[in-house]
Amino acid sequence: MEGGGGIGSSDVEREDEDAATDILRDRFRLCTISIAEAEAKQNNMEISQPIMTCIADLAFKYAGQSSSLSSLHATIGD
């Protein structure tokens, strides 16, 4: 019984992590789009929605990789 509960709780934890990641990605995307729109407006330019979405996704992936590398360097440094 105990082992079965562990598997179920692992699935729930994984779903919670996935949901939290989705929320974080969406908030990050909105912030990135807002910054891109403000910069474009400041320079009297327009930026298309697909380009903004692409930039936001790339920035989120880069931030995730940078975080992973920082954690790795911190672990190696110990």
Image: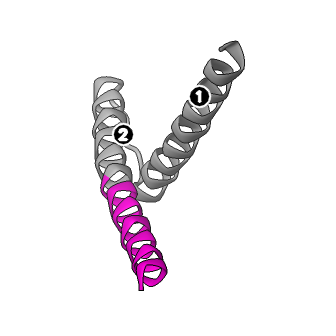
Give amino acid for label 1. Ser
Q: Residues within 10 Å of mark 2 (few under 14, many from 20)?
A: some
Q: State if disc 2 and disc 1 touch (CB < 8 Å).
A: no
Q: Which mark is residue 32?
A: 2
Q: Nearer the viewer, residue 63 or 7?
A: 7
Q: Amino acid at mark 2?
A: Thr
Q: Residues in magenta? A: 1-23
Q: Secondary structure at mark 2?
A: helix
Residue 38 drawn at (x, y percent) = 28, 31
Identify the element where label 1 is drawn. helix
Closer to the camera, 50 or 18?
18
Q: Position of residue 12 (x, y in %)?
A: 36, 73
Disc number for residue 71:
1
Q: Nearer the viewer, mark 1 or mark 2?
A: 1
Residue appearing at x 43%, y 49% in the figure: 52
Task: State yes or no: residue 43 in magenta.
Answer: no
On-image quarter of the C terminus: top right
Figure quadrant of residue 26: bottom left
Q: Is residue 68 above or below residue 57?
A: above
18 on left or right of 41: right
Vertical side of 32 occupied by 30: above or below: below
Q: Is residue 71 above or below residue 53?
A: above
